[in-house]
Image (spheres, rainbow, N blue to C red):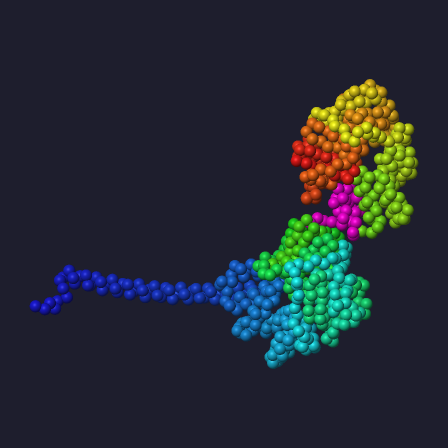
Amino acid sequence: MVNTSLGTPSDTRIIIQFRSITQNIDIMIKLKLSILVWAIGLSMTAFSQTTSSLRAKVLTLNDYPDALRLWELYNDSASVMDKATQLHAKVSLYYYFNRPDEMLQCVDSLLTLYPKECTTEQKLAYCYVKAEKLLEKGHYKKLNTWWKSLRKDKKLYREIEKQENFPCSEKAIQGLSDKDNFRVDFPESSSTVPTSYTYPLVLSVTINRTTLPATIFDTGAPYTFLTKETATKCNVQCMGDTIPVKSMFGTSQATTGFVKTLQLGSITFHNVTVHVSLLEKDPIFSGHDALLGLKELRGISALEFEFGKLTLKQKSLRSPLDPNMCFAETGCAFLFANGQNYLLDTGGEGSFSNTPDSVSTKVIDVNGYPVQFFNTYTTIPAAQKSGLLGFPFFSGFKICTLDFDRMNFSGEGYRLRKSYSELMNSGDMIGLDIEYERISKTTDEMGKWLTNASLEMMKNKPESCIQYTDSLLGKYQQELGGSIIYVLNLRAASLAYLGLYKEAGDLMKMCAQAVPDMINGYNKCMALTPFGAQQLSWEQPEVTLNTTFSEKGFLASAEINGNKNKLYFAPDQINSSISEADAGKLNMKIIEFEDHTTATGKKRMAIANELKLGNLLIKNVQFNLTEGNDIILGNSLLRLIPQFSIESQKLVLMQQVQSFTNAKQYPLLLINYTFCFRDPDDDTQKYSIGNPTPYTRKITLQDLCKSSGKIVFDMKDMKLLKIN
């Protein structure tokens, strides 16, 4: 029997349920499809709105101050930008961040693949930057070919003709059309070029085999710029066009010039376009041969500025971008800092800021560097966001780098440089010593002699100080003006250091007419004149003393005027001192003289005829009278010992300076009879031993001795040596 039924009643229920479920699924699918279509529609609308919004943001950030914001926007949102928007952003980013090849590719893609995504103004702008970069890259034939094709777009070409500041004229393009492309021979990974130490930054370049030793390196100049006379001397071919060149002197007229070779150090740039002034003796050059601008150097990986030299570096692989600076539309480099845009300009004599502040100068922090600005008054908000970092900013660094690969400015060892007169007037003598090399190479002869006289006094060399003061008084007496008292005071102090008290006193008396307080020095010198200088007599070249160390110094045995006693050897004390009672017991001579700085108007001192430390005999030892019970030998005497060392409880006095291996040497000064030293590896670490001194941190004698196993005071070469 054939079963034609649909099955048992139970089977029928299953089939009916299945059909019901299937129908429900169909309904759900249709519902989901409709939701999906609706969601996709919303998503597409949102995407369209996002793309439109991003395009608007990209096109709004179209000036060099916006470069970092555009960089951040692109990094955050490039994945949701349409292709044309990406290209618009890339053109700007590659332009500002020194990627000319990539920028040219993006311009070509926009103009050929997405012409409808560009307005007439944008097309005009992209033609402008393409011409600029082809000229910068030195692709002269390609520039001419592209220019010919551009002329076919008559509407766009007419707009270009209206532009007064187009980067190159048709005359120049045609004149360069048969020239070989620009190229660079960089034989090694770096090349160092000597530069001047002072403003302006001068170096030597060679153009067409003619050396130009008086060339200003001006990072504020986008193009290399030659005088008319230099161009003639170097056989530079001129194109005959006219280019306006703006400067602080106004607007000069120039023409495009073609240079076959431009040599800078070991680097040779071939087939270079320059600007040539059309004015004879153009004031923009201030008597120099040429200005070396940045155009040729933008293809170099990095420029490193150091005192007296410029190093150019080339890497085989370009570093990724890490920008804090950019190139502006003018071709100049700007540093971003604190919401401001600063032109990096070695051609600037000073640093300038635009501000509504009426104060003429101000120190402003620029990325952690304190910079002294000359203020230019303005009430225009946009102008207040710009400034100029000139030559003093660059020279403030031990080394600073313009990295054109990373588009990053960095530096190390920065300080706000001061002149020798500023350092002297502020009492920063240890700062004067730190800046000595720079000052000796950047100041005039009078400034050098003043610096040397001051430092020789602090370096315990009174004879040398006197030589410099005599030279100053002999040659620059009128030019010194009010500083003549300072020079006379230095001379008088040096004479007193040598024990020539009468000569020192006579000079102080003369100076007291202008500086009344110096009469106190005169009175002291007159009181000391009968005794003469403190004198050391060595029976042996070396004296070893066993001591006990305490916070007062090194307690050692001594013999004073034939009497055995204990005294403290204390290189943290300015003067030697003793109580009047002890001075009387030890048969010292007491002297008294007028001193208006004391409460009584009088000052008393004690003189020991003889003092023996082991086999070292010292005559005419001077002590200040104090209320204390201790006898102390301070720096007014200790400076006469050529060298002494401190190790544990042992004190060694040396007639001749000895050398020590594995010793770290610290430059040492004696400032107002206080020993001051600094870390040679970190000039910010400056210390004074026992007494506060301007611009130093006071350190105790105990802390000094704890810092090393052995300490050596070298009074001849003025060094503090630490030996572990």
Q: Position of residue 608 (x, y in %)?
A: 84, 25
Magenta stretch containing residue 38, yes or no?
Answer: no
Of residues 375 and 661, the one drawn nearer to the viewer in this rendering: 661
Question: Which residue is pictured at 76% across the width and 56% down the height?
Answer: 196
Left-right relation of 150 to 470:
left
Chain part drawn in magenta: 414-442
Left-right relation of 467 to 373:
right
| Residue at the far top in the pictured view | 585
Res 68 quadrant in image: bottom right
Question: Which residue is pictured at 83% across the width and 46% down the height?
Answer: 450
Q: Position of residue 224 (x, y in %)?
A: 72, 66
Of residues 679 and 375, the one drawn nearer to the viewer in this rendering: 679
- The secondary structure that dominates the magenta segment is helix
Res 241 quadrant in image: bottom right
Q: Is residue 264 visible?
A: yes
- Vertically, is 70 above or below 627? below
